[in-house]
Image (cartoon, rainbow, N blue to C red):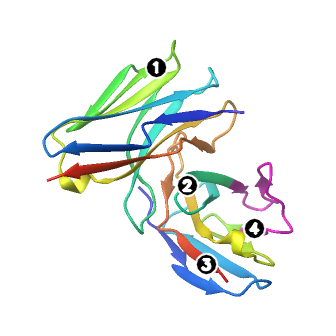
Amino acid sequence: SAVISQKPSRDICQRGTSLTIQCQVDSQVTMMFWYRQQPGQSLTLIATANQGSEATYESGFVIDKFPISRPNLTFSTLTVSNMSPEDSSIYLCSVEPPQGRETQYFGPGTRLLVL
Amino acid sequence: GENVEQHPSTLSVQEGDSAVIKCTYSDSASNYFPWYKQELGKGPQLIIDIRSNVGEKKDQRIAVTLNKTAKHFSLHITETQPEDSAVYFCAATETGRRALTFGSGTRLQVQP
């Protein structure tokens, strides 16, 4: 399985500001995803990070609020823009390794609190 | 789109007993069903998965069964230990997509 790291591991932010979360993988992967996990809840897919093209967003998530970059096959960023307290969540990246056949591995998550 | 329902939401067992968590899915074309364990403060960890061409899969104390006709799959943990205490999530793929749809989670508490 791939080794995935996320930065920062946690942060406390003021409303109206933006935070960029980084996801780094120790090997090249085909697919990278970003999920949100609200307190005590399940995981909801935000978007699929596509290398070399724009991310594919799920219903209810828009690029202006959650811009995503994927400059290469081992790295992606998610920005949470113009934050409000409702954005307080755990943000998780996941990867599907080459020949992974839908198998996904998750990073440790970024715990965000917006005041 | 795919909808995954998971039961129970909480489960308390005595150490050494078995635990069973059940999920149902809506998209009959789904073909991949993983289970994740999430400990406090950590990301989800893949513990076992099953594909639609298999009815059962076992890995030591953990097993998963799949009934494609009824569109449900279950996680079985035998000889539970306190370190099995965590939140467990089931998930399923959607047709033509690689991203996962998750169940609502089950908080398992193993009492020593």
Magenta stretch: dominant secondary structure = loop
Residue A15: percent from left, percent from top: 75, 83
> Disc 1 vs disc 2: Cβ atoms closer than 8 Å?
no
Residue B43: percent from left, percent from top: 45, 62
Residue under pointer 2 = A41
Residue under pointer 3 = A113
Seen from the viewer's position, the closer of residues B37 and A22 is: B37
Read off the magenta span.
Answer: A46-70
Q: Amino acid at mark 1?
A: Asn
Which residue does the image show at 66% across and 33% down from the upper left?
B2
Residue under pointer 1 = B53
Q: Which mark is residue A68?
A: 4
Q: Chain of mark 3?
A: A
Q: Secondary structure at mark 4?
A: strand
Relative to residue B51, is residue A73 depicted above or below?
A: below
Q: Chain of mark 2?
A: A
Q: Secondary structure at mark 3?
A: strand
Q: Amino acid at mark 3?
A: Leu
Q: CA distance from mark 4 to mark 1?
A: 35 Å
Which residue does the image show at 63% across and 45% down from the upper left?
B99
Residue A56: percent from left, percent from top: 78, 53
Query: Closer to the observer: label 2 or label 4?
Result: 2
Q: Are marks 2 and 3 on the same chain?
A: yes
Q: Is residue A8 visible?
A: no
Query: Closer to the observer: label 3 or label 1?
Result: 3
Give the mark nearer the N terminus: 2 vs 4: 2
Relative to residue B11, is residue A62 depicted above or below?
A: below
